[in-house]
Image: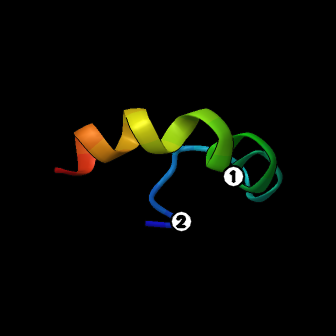
């Protein structure tokens, strides 16, 4: 689901993979 996060490329790699998946996964589903 990379690229689906509303973060910049940098935030997507540093923070996106840290706390975003649990939150975004619910929105993507």
Q: Residue visible at 66% across and 40% down?
A: 18
* Image-based side of 19 in relation to 9, left or right: left
Q: Residue visible at 25% across and 38% down?
A: 26
- Residue 28 circle label: none
Q: Residue visible at 51% across and 50% down?
A: 5
Q: Earlier in the sequence, mark 1 or mark 2?
A: 2
Circle 2 packing at 10 Å, graded few (<14), some (14-19), many (20+), is few
On screen, residue 3 above or below 11? below
Measuring from the top left, give residue 25's x and y in whole percent. Answer: 32, 46
Rounded to the nearest angstrom, the CA distance separating label 1 from label 2 is 8 Å
Look at mark 2 in the image and give the residue it sits on: 3
Look at mark 1 in the image and give the residue it sits on: 12
Measuring from the top left, give residue 28's x and y in whole percent. Answer: 25, 51
Circle 1 packing at 10 Å, graded few (<14), some (14-19), many (20+), is some
**Circle 1/circle 2 CB separation < 8 Å:** yes
Please state which of residues 15 and 7 is positioned toward the viewer in this rendering: 15
Q: Residue furthest left?
A: 29
Q: Residue visible at 53% across and 65% down?
A: 3
Measuring from the top left, give residue 9's x and y in whole percent. Answer: 75, 59
């Amino acid at each position: 689901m990379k690229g689906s996060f509303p973060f910049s490329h940098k935030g997507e790699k540093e923070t996106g993979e840290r706390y975003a998946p649990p939150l975004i996964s619910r929105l993507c589903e």
